[in-house]
Image (cartoon, rainbow, N blue to C red):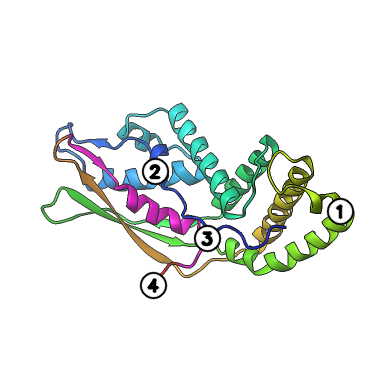
Amino acid sequence: MKGMRKKVLIPVLALALAAGLCACAPGGVSAEDATVYVRGLIDQTYLGQFDADYLALVDSTEEEAQEIYSSNLDVDVENFAAYYAIDTVTDELREEIRALYQAMYAEANFEVQDAVRDGDAASYSIVVVVEPLDIYQRVDAALEEVLDSFHAEYFAEHPEALESTGEPGDPAYDAYDAAYAQTILDLFWEKLPEAGYFEAQNVVVQLQRDEETHIWDMPENQFQSLNDYFNYFDYPME
């Protein structure tokens, strides 16, 4: 019933990012501050780790950071469901997908290099070296065969699913959709211990000062570029 997955653009997590840095203090924002900010942002977003120096820079609390981290996991859940054409995300399924992302992010390999001032410009450049995890590719390589087997067995045991409307709210379809989703999740859990890494990628992000507000922040599109390597759904386009 479900064939090829729906490929979607992964939304920017801008609404779940922390505030930028205020340059009001004497001396403004240093290169060390910029490095702490980027490392802290990555740790908060993907690892659920909240560095005290980072929280002080963005004038935030651990409770607020935890809310941002949780919101990001919910975005991951929605992206996962859209990418694999899962129509209904129950509370139980949501928790398992969140747990899967936590487990995948725990395997992340990255290094934040020291920030460098961009000449006289009001910006810093920071290189983040990321080794993308190949879990999505391992799953995709096995997915067609796994789903073919799943469909053959499921429809043999549940012929009523073939007569369903194919829409959420139809009990027969909802049961099928739940079993389909679980099959994909089971494949992820099976492949995660085998996962390796692609060649390291240097991702350059900037911390820039807004001339009107004097707030230093990372442009949303640059965070999105960084996120693409932590969620390496597709090989990057050349």
Percent position (x, y) of residue 88? 66, 42
Mark 1: amino acid: Pro
Q: Element at badge 2?
A: helix
Most extreme residue toward the left is 120
> Can I make out residue 106 in this image?
no
Whole-number angstrom distance, CA of label 2 to CA of label 4: 27 Å
Question: Where does the magenta region start and end?
Answer: 213-235
Circle 2: is it few (<14), some (14-19), or many (20+) Cα within 10 Å?
many
Mark 3 or 1: in front is: 1
Tag 2 residue: 41
Whole-number angstrom distance, CA of label 4 to CA of label 3: 15 Å
In the picture, the disc for residue 238 is 4
Circle 4: is it few (<14), some (14-19), or many (20+) Cα within 10 Å?
few
Mark 4: amino acid: Glu
Mark 3: amino acid: Phe
**Image height of 100 relative to 24, above or below:** below
Percent position (x, y) of residue 175? 78, 44
* Lower position in the chain sequence, tag 1 or tag 4: 1
Question: Is there a contact, CB below 8 Å, between mark 1 and mark 4?
Answer: no
Mark 2: amino acid: Leu
Circle 3: is it few (<14), some (14-19), or many (20+) Cα within 10 Å?
many
Whole-number angstrom distance, CA of label 2 to CA of label 3: 21 Å
Identified at 17% across, 55% down, the residue is 118
Q: Element at badge 4?
A: loop
Q: In the visual, does 133 lie left or right of 166?
A: left
* Lower position in the chain sequence, tag 3 or tag 1: 1
Residue 219 counted in the magenta span: yes
In the picture, the disc for residue 159 is 1
Tag 3 residue: 233
